[in-house]
Amino acid sequence: MVTLVARQSIIIKCNMQTSALLGNYEFYYAAGLFCRLRRIEVDADILPGALKKAILPALSESKPEDPKERYLVNMLLGYEPDEEYETQMRELLRWGLGEERIWQVN
């Protein structure tokens, strides 16, 4: 249930272009989605600080034309992950990496 809520939250935020990332659960799904869009490979067991560090160069260089993707990038750039890590975060990262229904809540 937590994973579904985190996924839906990111999609709604990008669609409405409002709010910010509110925790590592959202961060992991958002990072996975960004990596999918940019074809960046990351280990699913990566810790929060290492994940941010791994995607930061691509985030900094990213200039997406799509407003939803641009908002995703801005949210990721503005988020500083804490050290909390749980196995559901790995699941969220994988979900983002394999997302087939980008920007669809259902």
Image: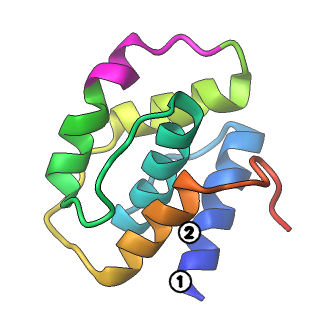
**Image location (x, y in percent) of residue 66:** 72, 21
- The residue nearer to you, when weighing 2 against 96, is 96
Mark 2 belongs to which amino acid? Ala
Horizontally, residue 49 falls left or right of residue 57, namely: left
Q: Is residue 16 above or below residue 27?
A: above
**Image location (x, y in percent) of residue 59:** 38, 24
Horizontally, residue 60 falls left or right of residue 51, namely: right
Residue 56 appears in which quarter of the rendering?
top left
Q: Main secondary structure of the magenta part?
A: helix
Please tell me whether residue 88 belongs to the stretch shown in magenta.
no
Query: Can you name the residue that lies furthest to the bottom here?
Result: 1
**Image location (x, y in percent) of residue 46:** 22, 59
For mark 2, what is the residue? 6
Please tell me whether residue 59 belongs to the stretch shown in magenta.
yes
For the residue carrying disc 2, how many other residues have a C-alpha within 10 Å: few (<14), some (14-19), or many (20+)? Answer: many
Which segment did they paint magenta? 57-64
For mark 1, what is the residue? 2
- Residue at the image point whose x is 22% and y is 74% from the top: 85
Residue 100 appears in which quarter of the rendering?
bottom right
